[in-house]
Amino acid sequence: MKKILAVLLLTIVLVTAQKVQAAFDDTYWGVRALGMGGAFTAVSNDANAPLYNVAGTAFTAQNEVTLMGSRLFAGLEGVEIGANYAGFVHPIDSKYGTISFAWASISTPGLRREDTFNIGYARLLNDILRLDSEIVELSAGLNVKYLMQEVKFGENEKDLETYKGAMTGDIGLLAMFSNGIGIGYTSKYVVPADIGFMEKDEVKNINVVGLSYYNDELPYIKIPYFTIALDVIFRDNESSIRAGVESYVLDRKLAIRLGGREEAFNIGFGYEFAFANETKLVIDYALELPMQVEESYGSHFFSLSFKF
């Protein structure tokens, strides 16, 4: 029992790696976003958007599905943590918006698991608010989320229930200006969700403000298809920062990404294969190197995305 508790405690600490810990901390989803250090709130325009800023799904031009698998803190003896993500976005049209579905899971086999199930909707607001799309495009979105956690207790606690779930939601806004500046905001877990087993344990609300800048060719430095992004996260009276950059080379086929936050440094790559009828297959990889876990040689993330 002591060994199980020790591994469980270590798992919780490693999974969160934050000054203030809370369950369902959005850190390990979306390989493209992870390559940029998780700074994605004002960039979100693909199937990774549902868990970063659902409003960004309104900017997707095609159906897109993405599947992610990972191994966290590889090389750390006695700790096996995996994170998986699946996302799907379906643009209906500019009038009716975009719907999205997402599932995210992080677990230590036989000990603890967290699952998030998302259904989202987003829409451009320019026609409603009579905004000039040549100046700015503004979108808003809403997620309905079901959170479920599973904990394997010891023999002495076998009478305790092992599953606990709760409903909550997210809201998001994203403004993309014609000069390349993006401003995003999302509030996650806006409805209190109690996922405690023996006592009340509400998932803490997260508020994120994101800034981004995109240019087809960065002036002076001449970096092609360049994006720089910054997220400021507020949770439980604490704040943290994530930052990242992205560039596409080789006729916009190869993506190169760098990013980081206080606890880790990230690097990522992606390659796009184009087929007939504008269908595309994108392969992405990201490596996160933790600053505070010397025994690990990093967390590895891999995804396949299909646009059609």
Image: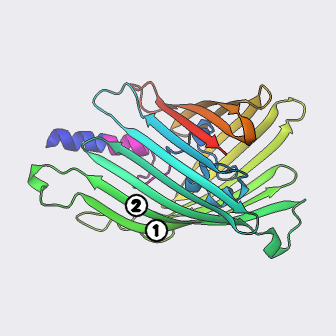
Label 2: how many Cα within 10 Å (few below 14, some 14–19, many 20+): many
Specify whether residue 200 is painted magenta: no
Q: Mark 2 points at which residue?
A: 147
Note whether residue 86 is visible: yes
- 3 left or right, relative to 50: left
The residue located at (33%, 49%) in the rendering is: 113
Sequence-first disc among 2 and 1: 2
Q: Residue 305: which disc? A: none
Q: Is residue 76 left or right of residue 174?
A: left
Residue 182: x, y in percent? 76, 53
Residue lying at 45% horizontally and 35% vertically, measured from the top left:
70
What residue type is disc 1 on?
Thr
> Is residue 195 in sight in this rendering?
no
236 or 298, nearer to the observer: 298
- Mark 2–mark 1 Cα distance, whole angstroms, equals 8 Å
- The residues colored magenta run 11-27
- Disc 1 packing (10 Å; few <14; some 14–19; many ≥20): some
Q: Which amino acid does label 2 sit on?
A: Leu
In the rendering, at what x and y percent does residue 136 appear? Answer: 84, 60
Which image quarter: residue 207? Answer: bottom right
Residues under numbered marks 2 and 1 in contact, where contact means CB atoms less than 8 Å apart: yes
Image quarter where the C terminus lies is top right
Kindly identify which residue carries mark 1: 168
Q: In this view, does 26 lie to the left or right of 185?
A: left
| In the image, residue 275 above or below residue 140 | above
Q: Who's the residue at 73% across and 63% down the image? A: 93
**Residue 110 image offset from top left, x and y in percent:** 24, 43
Pick whichever, 88 or 181, lies toward us.
88
Residue 24 colored magenta?
A: yes
Q: How many labels does the image show?
A: 2
